[in-house]
């Protein structure tokens, strides 16, 4: 199991040809912490850590922004706050929480596509 952020960090490490141990030492974290991040067993890393990762890999600004965005959507222990929303929103969030582990990957992709389409179709202020 991994997260989008874990997958991205592993890809960067592979591209640079460095071990978790070497990267952890350079970033001032333990190899166990880095391993837990890569395997989706830790929450979202701090902004400071993300900056150190971007600097360590000498990534360009656009790639750093993408890394930060991926980190934001990679917390494996999310909380959905439905306070103040209609009851069906709370029911939906709880149902998704209860069922997500049993959903086939294709269903998750379809639901993500529906959400993406809905978000992109909203009128944006401007």
Image (cartoon, rainbow, N blue to C red):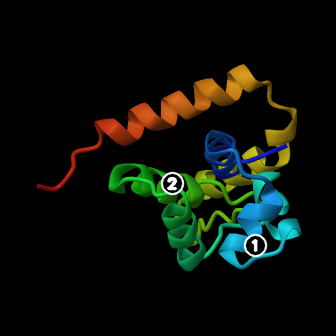
> Residue at point 34% right, 56% down?
61
Q: Residue at x 45, y 36 (%)?
A: 116
Q: Secondary structure under badge 1?
A: helix
On screen, residue 68 above or below 8: below
Q: Quadrant of residue 25?
A: bottom right
Cα–Cα gap, marks 1 and 2: 20 Å
Hey, which quadrant is residue 14 in on the image? Answer: top right
Q: Nearer the viewer, residue 75 or 117?
A: 75
Q: Can residue 77 be seen from the camera position used here?
A: no
Question: Which residue lies under the disc numbered 2?
Answer: 67
Q: Using a 10 Å C-alpha cutoff, classify the residue at mark 2 as few (fewer than 14 neighbours), some (14 to 19) or many (20 or more).
A: many
Residue 33 appears in view? yes
Q: Nearer the viewer, residue 8 or 42?
A: 8
- What residue appears at the point 43 percent right and 57 percent down from the top-left corner? 64
Relative to 99, 73 lies left or right: left
Residue underneath mark 1: 25
User: Does residue 104 appear left or right of residue 5 in this picture?
Assistant: right
* Residue 109 image point, x, y percent: 63, 26
When asked about the image quadrant of residue 123, the answer is top left
Left or right, 82 with reference to 3? left
**Where, quadrant-wise, is the N terminus in this rendering?**
top right
Q: State the image coordinates of residue 62 (x, y, percent, origin top left).
A: 35, 50
Report the mark closest to the observer, 1 or 2. Answer: 1
Specify the farthest residue to the left. 126
* Residue 92 position in % (x across, y down): 67, 47
């Amino acid at each position: 199991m991994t997260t989008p952020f874990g997958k991205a960090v592993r890809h960067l490490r592979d591209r640079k040809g460095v071990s978790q141990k070497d990267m952890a030492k350079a970033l001032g974290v333990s190899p166990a912490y880095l391993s837990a991040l890569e395997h989706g067993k830790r929450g979202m890393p701090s902004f400071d850590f993300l900056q150190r990762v971007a600097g360590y890999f000498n990534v360009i600004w656009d790639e750093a922004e993408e890394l930060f965005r991926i980190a934001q959507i990679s917390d494996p222990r999310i909380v959905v706050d439905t306070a103040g929303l209609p009851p069906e929103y709370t029911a939906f969030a709880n149902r998704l929480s209860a069922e997500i582990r049993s959903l086939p990957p294709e269903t998750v992709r379809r639901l993500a596509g529906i959400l993406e389409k809905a978000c992109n179709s909203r009128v944006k202020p401007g």
